Amino acid sequence: MLTLGTYKILSVSEETEHGYILKEDKGDEVLLPGNLAFRDLQKGENVRVFLYKDGEERLTATMQEPDVSLNNMAMLKAKDLTRYGAYFDWGLDKDLLVPHSEQIGELREGQDYLVYLYLDKETNRLVGSMKIDRFLDNSTISVDEEEEVELRILNKTDLGYNVAINGKHRGLIYHDEFFTDITYGEKKTGYIKNIRPDKKIDVTLRPIGYKKVEGAADRILNKLKDSEGFLNLHDKSDPDKIRERLSMSKKTFKKAIGRLYKEDIIRIEENGIYLRD
């Protein structure tokens, strides 16, 4: 089946004056215009293409790779604001329309906005929407607690930031989870912290629990856990003291705590290192 907004690997059936006729196993055909092929193709060759409608509303294949595919979202630049809506640059020759009804706030040409690509069932056209929340659904949860997920930062609330999880679910990151500045539409790696009985999802930017580390870092973690989360050693400690307590050189110790600090597993104070809660 040839579905708009998706990638498909198709076989070259024949070459015409307009380009290449591509065919899938079930027999459906689509034209790959010559100017969108980017190289000479041979009959019988398999080629990966993106499916969309050209300016005359015909199903068309392209070897161009758009910035967003069906049922996904991306930051896109507004190119032209018209009475029909806003046209966005999404990496194809034909711009993507975001109708007025799918916009939020006042748009400005040249500015980037988070846009979701969906297929309008009434018109059978690919359409963009800035109303991300209506495409997110928590009725059936497809993630588990502690799972690593892809996040998109949405709007700010009194509690924190709403986020899109894997482009499917809505979640919340609390204010105290942030250690760096974030921006609307930014893509982040996150972790599922809690799935509540009402199917609301709490998310964190830090790995859940103690992230697995090897060698010296693992030894330091075990020592911290055995010492109620505190170890009175730091990067200025005497090398002999470090070797006596941990059986490692000061150089190895500094490298290990640097790794643990970067992964936000420990915090380093003047009197030693602490395991984060």
Image (cartoon, rainbow, N blue to C red):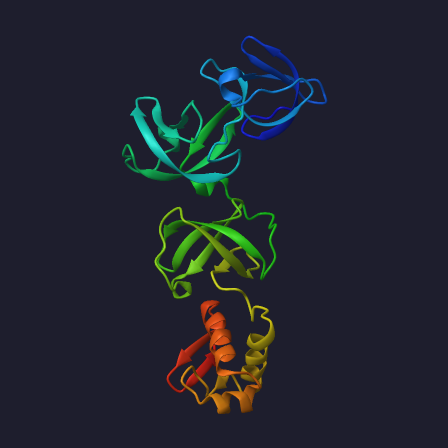
Q: Position of residue 22 (x, y in %)?
A: 63, 18
Residue 102 placement, left or right of 220: left
Against 41, residue 245 (above or below) is below
The quadrant holding residue 89 is: top left
Q: Looking at the image, which is closer to me, 191 or 51?
A: 51
Q: Is residue 183 above or below residue 254?
A: above
Q: Residue at x 56, y 57 (%)?
A: 148
Residue 214 visible in image: yes
Residue 29 spot, x, y in % from top left: 64, 16
Residue toward you, 54 or 136: 54
Which residue is at 35% across, 51% downward?
Answer: 183
Quarter of the image with the N terminus is top right
Asked if one can make out residue 123 in the rendered structure from this viewpoint, the answer is no
**Residue that appears at 46% across and 81% down:** 274
Q: Position of residue 221 (x, y in %)?
A: 56, 78
Farthest top residue? 17
Quarter assignment of residue 192? bottom right
Q: Is residue 153 left or right of residue 78?
A: right
Q: Is residue 202 above or below residue 217?
A: above
